[in-house]
Amino acid sequence: MSKEIILTGIKPTGTPHLGNLVGAIKPIIEMSQGRQAFVFIADLHALNMIHSPAELQKYTLEVAASFIALGLDTSKAVFFRQSDVPEVAYLSTLLMNVTPKGLMNRAHSYKEIQDINREKAFIKQMRLLEEDTVLNKTFSEKCKNLKDRYERLKSEGNENTEKSNQLKVLLEEFQNITSVFEKRYKEHVGKSKDERLIEKVFEFEQKVQKNVDLDIGINMGLYTYPVLMSADILLYNSDIVPVGKDQKQHVEFARDIAGSFNAIYGETFKLPQPFIQEDTGLIPGLDGRKMSKSYGNQIPIFDSEAELKKKIMRIITDSKLPEEPKNPDNDTIFLLYKHFADAAAVADLRTRFEKGGLGYGDAKKILYEAANDYLAAPRARYEALMKNPKEVYALLGDGAKRAREVAAATTDRVKRAMKLDYFN
Ligand code: ADP
Ligand code: TRP
């Protein structure tokens, strides 16, 4: 067994689907074989999204049962629930103090949500204006109206009070927006595309960006997410952290944070390495986009046989006739099949796609048979576990005990380094 410690966590934020199976659960189980592995359900991390206790409990159980049913060897891997090891919250609090705030500002995950907030604000403003036209005001009328109000404000000599300044900014904003729409309106009634319009839209976007609260809906759990993740990684002395590409930066943050701590308090933490899981390619969902709970296009791993069949039959395809040749590499049916059949069967289906003569209906049946063969035994195990969750909780409880031994040793070491143990 390799001496290296590997660790990874998976957030219980939804019912596990085939994308999670291929992109996360299967590779984690494979990597944990023959190594010292820590695998945990990151329920504390899920809390920044999920505030319903019933939901969190459901997903935690489903994710845990999925790992067990799909073959994670819990007698070897330390498999546990993050919140069962309170030392992680303690270490996280200590690490906060050696973590620059700027590092959190640079987190892709945080910046992405800010980008979404920016987009949403822009769209909301646009919509408000569109609704206004439904109320039957022409853009130019609206613009004139606003100009009048603006002029009146000026003539009243209220230009420099706090309130009027705010009003002025608002009116300017509206003027800008309406002129965008005025231009667009002209375009609609026949004028050719105008450079100025693009400029105006850009200016409008800048204004919206300046005035919008980019942190709407972002709680401190989300903002400090990378510190808690660093605590996960450092608490168990991890050498290797297998993660998807999107999480690489977080592991690098853990290295940075460990480095800052060591520089201040002396060598205490090993520096972990991210291991980017081999690109399995994104698993497409029913509509051909990335399979994701955010798109509602997922196939849960442990759907019943009948449900699995129904969903596979619903996969959206193009309108090619059976006899036409098809490109397997951008076909959802084929891309899913690759993960459930052996190499010879995959090569065979590839040829049938390329040659023509195979209709989508038949291809779906072939996929269903393969997926169902692959999933039947784990499904039976999963269903048994879901009927008897106590078995899952007992396994997680045992894992937590083993995890806490390591966690306690690490926190002792950290306290010694920080001299927090001065009266023990
Ligand atoms: P979702 O997109 O449904 O919200 P998550 O972000 O919770 O899924 O996914 C957890 C992990 O599962 C990801 O880090 C990624 O490794 C894997 N994963 C999710 N969807 C896919 C997919 N369509 N193809 C491949 N891997 C995926
Ligand atoms: N942030 C990871 C994700 O969203 C889950 C996670 C939490 C994790 N703590 C971790 C992964 C520690 C690796 C190591 O997928």
Image (tube, rainbow, N blue to C red):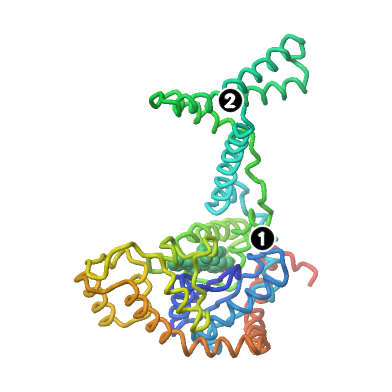
Residue at horizontal 66 percent and vertical 86 percent from the top: 389
Q: Dot 2 corresponds to which residue?
A: 138
Q: Residues within 10 Å of mark 1 (few under 14, many from 20)?
A: some
- Residue 231 placement (x, y as % from top left): 62, 65
- Could you say whether the residue bearing mark 1 is in a helix, strand or loop? loop
Q: Quadrant of ligand 2?
A: bottom right
Q: How many callouts does the rendering have?
A: 2
Q: Dot 1 corresponds to which residue?
A: 48
Q: Residue furthest right?
A: 423
Seen from the viewer's position, the closer of residues 229 and 406 is 229
Mark 1 and mark 2 in contact? Answer it, CB < 8 Å: no
- Which mark is nearer the camera, 1 or 2? 2
Residue at horizontal 49 percent and vertical 76 percent from the top: 25
Residue 115 higher or lower than 242, as above or below: above
Q: Amino acid at mark 1?
A: Asn
- Residue 215 placement (x, y as % from top left): 65, 46
Seen from the viewer's position, the closer of residues 292 and 269 is 292
